[in-house]
Image (cartoon, grey):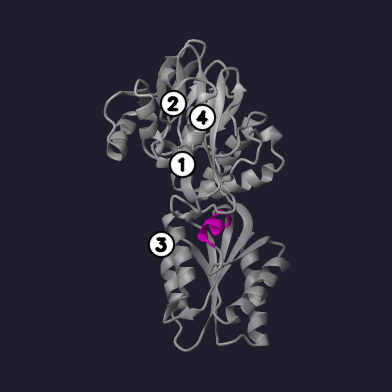
Amino acid sequence: MPAVEIRPGIYWIGVNDRTTDLFEGLWPITQEGVSYNTYLVDGEQKGLIDLAKGLKTDEFLDQVAQVIDLSELDYIIINHMEPDHTGILRTLRRIAPQAVVLGTRKTREMLEAFYQVTEGVRVVEDGERLSLGSHTLQFFSTPFVHWPETMMTYEVTHRVLFSCDGFGGYGALQGAIFDDRCGDPALYEREALRYYVNIVAVFSRPVLKAIERLKDVPIEVIAPSHGLIWRKDPGRIIELYRKWAGYATGEREMGVTLLYGSMYGNSEQMMNAVAQGVSQAGVPVEIFDVARTHTSYVLPSLWVRQGVIVGAPTYEGGLFPPMAHTLDIAVRKRILNRKAAYFGSYGWSGGARREFARLAESLKWEVVDTFEFHGGPTLEDLRAGEAFGRRFAEALR
Ligand code: FEO
């Protein structure tokens, strides 16, 4: 895609990544893709804000060259050091060695550690302004959104916030780069939530701090480094991020995430009975087969809902391994303080319930009920499962 002028003298330069399968080597994006948005501010002096992963380098450099000659570039502004935003840095420095790299104090340390760059680097302070002639930039320190060195850059004249990971999401751009031109904003909101929970949610407190820090800054455009540019309704993505960050400790949505795994269909049969019970109580339920669904897609539901039911059999004296893995990721992502229940089938000794209890303790989950059955469920077992689901849903209210 060619460079796009988003405000007078401010350009989007973007790399659309549809070939990386795992973001951070971990989170699937094969279907959705991701964009690395860079912004070029073309004043009497010229600055590039954030870069891209080191792929499609020619395309990236050609886009910049559509607007300025790279020999004219004065500044490379690094909001965040993660290599999806800096991978192209060494190449760019070879082509534009005169450009000064700007970032926070921690960015300077990381520049040396990641790329052995020590020369031509200048530290900027929180609140500092930089005039580019017809444009003025201001830097806001926003540590841990997403790494400790992170800052956001604000263009004062046109009120554009270059927020980097903050307010970003998965999803390659499908022609449209603006919220008001996008035919399917729900997709980007869904992918922004998945991105938030996969990447940023552990740092929810810093996210709320950053939003607070920016509360008096008039913002007309949110220009993140991943996903859509929000110019029609920048408040929308800010409010979504505020709401999601609030779920870390505050009130969550009424509903149940029902995680299950099943070896031969016995726990699955019971899962259907339990789900019936939850539905009878009028509580929404979202169901995931954890052996077939990457945790990336499970985490958003766990993050936003108050209730969790875990259904999985005993496997070699412990919890069915894909379920243990999913709950371990939930521990790492600090999905704490939910109301929970467990059910599952066992063949002889049991053991899954014990391992679940241990994991639930790490998660500070309040386990309100558990239910085990031997082998395949009888009709009586299924009726008990239905009642168990109904009781749990009613307890959530
Ligand atoms: Fe988009 Fe934290 O990197």
Q: CA distance from mark 1 to mark 2?
A: 28 Å
Amino acid type at circle 3 is Ser
Residue 63 seen in render: yes
Q: Which residue is more in the foreground, 84 or 129?
A: 84
Q: Which comes sooner in the sequence, label 1 or label 3?
A: 1
Q: Which comes sooner in the sequence, label 4 or label 3?
A: 4
Does residue 132 appear left or right of residue 182 in this picture?
left
Q: Which comes sooner in the sequence, label 4 or label 2?
A: 4
Q: Which residue is more in the foreground, 254 or 198?
A: 198
Answer few, some or many: residues within 10 Å of disc 1's Cα (few below 14, many 20 plus, some between 14 and 19).
Answer: some
Q: Residue at x 58, y 51 (%)?
A: 252
Which residues are drawn in magenta?
294-302
Q: Indicate which disc residue 62 carries.
A: 4
Residue 158 sits in which quadrant? top right
Q: Indicate which disc residue 362 carries.
A: 3
Q: Which residue is more in the foreground, 338 or 58?
A: 58
Amino acid type at circle 1 is Leu
Q: Nearer the viewer, mark 1 or mark 4?
A: 4
Answer few, some or many: residues within 10 Å of disc 2's Cα (few below 14, many 20 plus, some between 14 and 19).
Answer: many
Which residue has dot 1 on it? 55
Which residue has dot 2 on it? 140
Does residue 296 appear left or right of residue 187 in this picture?
left
Indicate the position of residue 234 as horizontal and vertical percent values. Answer: 62, 31
Does residue 179 appear left or right of residue 227 in this picture?
right
Residue 215 seen in render: no
